[in-house]
């Protein structure tokens, strides 16, 4: 008996959030002042429907966000190329998520510290005993960007 192959299907928002949380990088796509698309993989951390990343206080990212704060987020937490011998078919199994949000620069130091703590806890949890010292040295020269989703994220999977 031949089994049905699962196809790509949309998943609930909570599942999509899990894809974002598991992905080592999230691609943030934006538009520059000259209309050129600009997308790059960044290390984001999330609290509820708000994502944070940090960067220097100048550069192309910030130029784009000042021009147009609307961004798209995309992530893949599983990607497995497959060859289906019975069909002689090449395919890929994946977990992916996308979302749209509005970006803004965080100016409040309390929120900046909260965002940096989220980022550090996500990517370097074993070094949190150094967090306060790093904040004291670099908070004033670190820019934090907050992305608030404008709609629930969409997740898809193919297994």
Image (cartoon, rainbow, N blue to C red):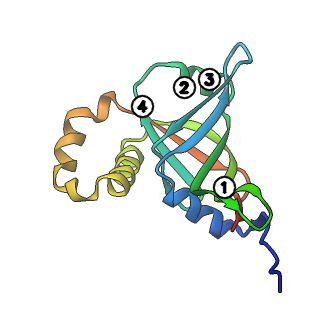
SS state under label 2: helix
Q: Which residue is mark 1?
A: 97
Marks 1 and 4: which is nearer the front?
A: 1
Marks 3 and 1: which is nearer the front?
A: 1
Which one is in front, 37 or 139? 37
Q: Quadrant of the N terminus?
A: bottom right
SS state under label 1: strand
Label 2 packing within 10 angstroms: few (<14), some (14-19), many (20+) = many
Q: Quadrant of the C terminus?
A: bottom right
Query: In the rendered structure, are the residues bearing label 1 and label 2 in contact, judged by CB atoms less than 8 Å apart?
Result: no
Marks 1 and 2: which is nearer the front?
A: 1
In the image, residue 31 sits, relative to residue 87, either above or below, namely above
Instruction: Report, in whole angstroms, how far the alpha carbon at label 1 lies from the one at label 4.
Output: 23 Å
Query: In the rendered structure, are the residues bearing label 2 and label 3 in contact, judged by CB atoms less than 8 Å apart?
Result: yes
Q: Position of residue 82 (x, y in %)?
A: 65, 59
Q: Which residue is mark 3?
A: 64
Q: Which residue is mark 4?
A: 55
């Amino acid at each position: 008996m031949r089994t049905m192959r699962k196809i790509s299907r949309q998943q609930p928002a909570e599942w999509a959030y899990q894809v974002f949380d598991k992905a080592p990088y999230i691609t943030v796509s934006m538009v520059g002042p000259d209309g050129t698309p600009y997308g790059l993989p960044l290390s984001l951390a999330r609290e509820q429907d708000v994502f944070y990343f940090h960067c220097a206080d100048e550069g192309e990212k910030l130029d784009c966000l000042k021009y147009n704060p609307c961004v798209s987020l995309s992530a893949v937490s599983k990607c497995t190329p497959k060859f289906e011998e019975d069909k002689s078919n090449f395919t890929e199994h994946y977990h992916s998520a996308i979302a749209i949000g509005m970006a803004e620069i965080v100016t409040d130091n309390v929120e900046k510290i909260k965002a940096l703590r989220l980022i550090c806890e996500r990517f370097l949890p074993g070094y949190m005993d150094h967090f306060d010292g790093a904040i004291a040295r670099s908070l004033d020269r670190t820019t934090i960007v907050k992305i608030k989703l404008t709609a629930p994220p969409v997740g898809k999977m193919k297994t």
